[in-house]
Image (spheres, rainbow, N blue to C red):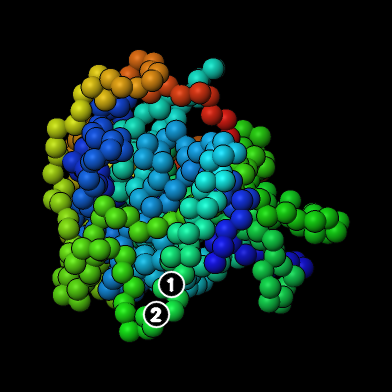
Amino acid sequence: MSIDKETIRHVAHLARIELQPNELEKLFGELHEILGFIDKLSILNVEQIKPTSHILPISNVLREDELHVSLNSDKALENAPSKKGNFFSVPKIIE
Amino acid sequence: MKYQTVIGLEVHLQLNTKTKAFCGCSTDFGKAPNSNVCPVCLGFPGSLPVYNRQALNSAIKLALAFNCQIQEHTKFDRKNYFYPDLPKNYQISQFDLPLSRNGYLDIYTQNLPKRIGITRVHLEEDAGKLIHETGCSLVDFNRTGIPLLEIVSEPDLNSPSEAFDYLNSLKSIIEYLDVSDCDMEKGSLRCDANISLRLLGAKELGVKTELKNMNSFKGVKDALTFEVERQTQLLETNQELVQETRLWDVEKAVTVVMRTKEGAKDYRYFPDPDLTVFIIEESMIAQIKAQLPELPQEKMRRFVKEYGLTEYDAKILVSSKNDAQFAENCIQNYPGEDKKEIVNWLIGPLLSEANLRKVKLHALNLNTNELISLIGFVQRQEISYLCAKNVLSQLIDTGKTTQDLIQEGNLQQISNADALSEVIETVIHENAKSVSDFKAGKTNALMYLVGQVMKKSSGKANPKVVGDLVRRRLS
Ligand SMILES: [Zn+2]
């Protein structure tokens, strides 16, 4: 499996990462290698192996429906780059 | 109709847990902005989500009530996209291993039963709320992380009114289960729709439109109705339909294209490594199944069987859980085997009073015993039905007893011929035209004359007796 530069640009855009031309070159090489490495799996017979979605052999971790103390809004907004009253403020979003 | 309408609905439902899906923040509605938040629901680095046991229980309950198969192995995935109402830049949702699949909902539509398939019911979390101001948008994360269920129907609905009936059935069941308050105004129930048209008999589905931004069940119906017309017109004039998302504009009563963001549908789902998988054991399912309440359909069948109600009457009474409870209480307390009379009062005068006051039947705060006492007065012909309806209204408004209201209003029915004769004479004297009409064989004229006597006696005359007296007097 290989990857072209257009796909890398697309994925970078989806992740909201801005790539400089030299970074694109670098990633192109690195991703190529990573995908080549993953390709090795295709030569293994995994028919008998159950798909894994989590590396730890634990399941059903749940919490009771009990209130904890939330942050007060001053604290919650403390590191906000921009705020207005008790709200976080962001550049205007229009759908 | 040349075309078949094909509709599938996607309902997002907030569960009524005390706390959010993955943290202990309160789910209370209407609190000061950003006061129900913590590092988990704000998506701070290093915080760890843990799912709410009550939310899982409620979800399984609902999935079972919708006849879904609960999956033995289920997990959470991350749905990745950037939007200011989503602090983690991904929504915790479910992709390939949802909680449940392959259910159905039996609905009544145009008085016929129809089975609507449920594709899946899966777990996810709500996003925050955005308020758009000039120059900036404000974000409140109180809603972020409230547990949601996504309930996806099969494209089995074939008209806007069928979609409307499906939503009402769905809401009724959810109310019975008590897993959500189902309030569309508060946003605890939201609905998107997919709609396409195809030539009758065609196998392939047509190009679909996704509809959003409907704020009520009626809005869903109106938006779908508009879309049926719009799509029909495009097809009839051989214009191309495009797959697109359209927003319902309730003011203008039209749907408008939503400007789509590039690559918006590329969500790159992957398993959320912060959350473990869930193995739902048979024993857990059996335990929750045992806790399921009697659901509207079962209750309807029981009302028909136990109390001799018609299916039509029973359906009206069971559509809301509290109303059903109130009605059953009335029916049980009503003396005798024959329950027709009390049911007629519930479906008739009581329901009109409720509609008039824009409340549910049970919220009329009517004392069951007073209602039964009132019906007794009518049955013994001590007061007229007309007066009784007025007394009912006063019972609701004043909270006084039936006995007192009848006495205070001096409403005892007049059945005595002597007491009625004077009024009857006056009415006959004043309505010569109706009298001659009646003599000429027009039976409607008699009804009119009786009505006039009722009016003059302030509704106290016994209409049956009056009818007999007038007929005798004029023959
Ligand atoms: Zn929280």
Label 1, secondary structure: give it. helix
Work out whether residue B370 can be spotted: no
What is the chain identity of the residue bearing mark 2? A
B61 relative position to B427: left or right = left
Residue type, mark 2 in image:
Leu
- Front in this rendered view, residue B85 or A10: A10
Q: How many marks?
A: 2
Residue type, mark 1 in image:
Lys
What residue sits 54% from the left and 17% below the top? Answer: B135
Spot occupied by residue B187 in the image (x, y as percentages of width and height): 40, 40
Q: Quadrant of the C terminus of chain B?
A: bottom right
What is the chain identity of the residue bearing mark 1? A
Spot occupied by residue B455 in the image (x, y as percentages of width and height): 46, 38
Q: Callout 1: few (<14), some (14-19), or many (20+) C-alpha neighbours within 10 Å?
A: few
Q: Quadrant of the N terminus of chain B?
A: bottom right
Say the numbered circle drawn on residue B351: none
Quadrant in the rendering for residue B407: top left
Query: Which residue in the rendered view is the most extreme toward the right?
Result: B237
Label 2, secondary structure: give it. loop
Instruction: Report whether mark 1 lies on the same chain as mark 2.
Output: yes
Quadrant in the rendering for residue B300: bottom left
Say the numbered circle drawn on residue A40: 1
Identify the residue under disc 2. A44
- Front in this rendered view, residue B1 or A65: A65
Q: Check the image and report above or below for A89 versus B392.
A: above
Q: CA distance from mark 1 to mark 2?
A: 7 Å
Work out whether residue B59 can be spotted: yes
What residue sits 56% from the left and 44% below the top? Answer: A24
Spot occupied by residue B224 in the image (x, y as percentages of width and height): 62, 52
Spot occupied by residue B383 in the image (x, y as percentages of width and height): 30, 47
**Mark 2 and mark 1 in contact (Cβ < 8 Å)?**
yes
- Front in this rendered view, residue B237 or B385: B237
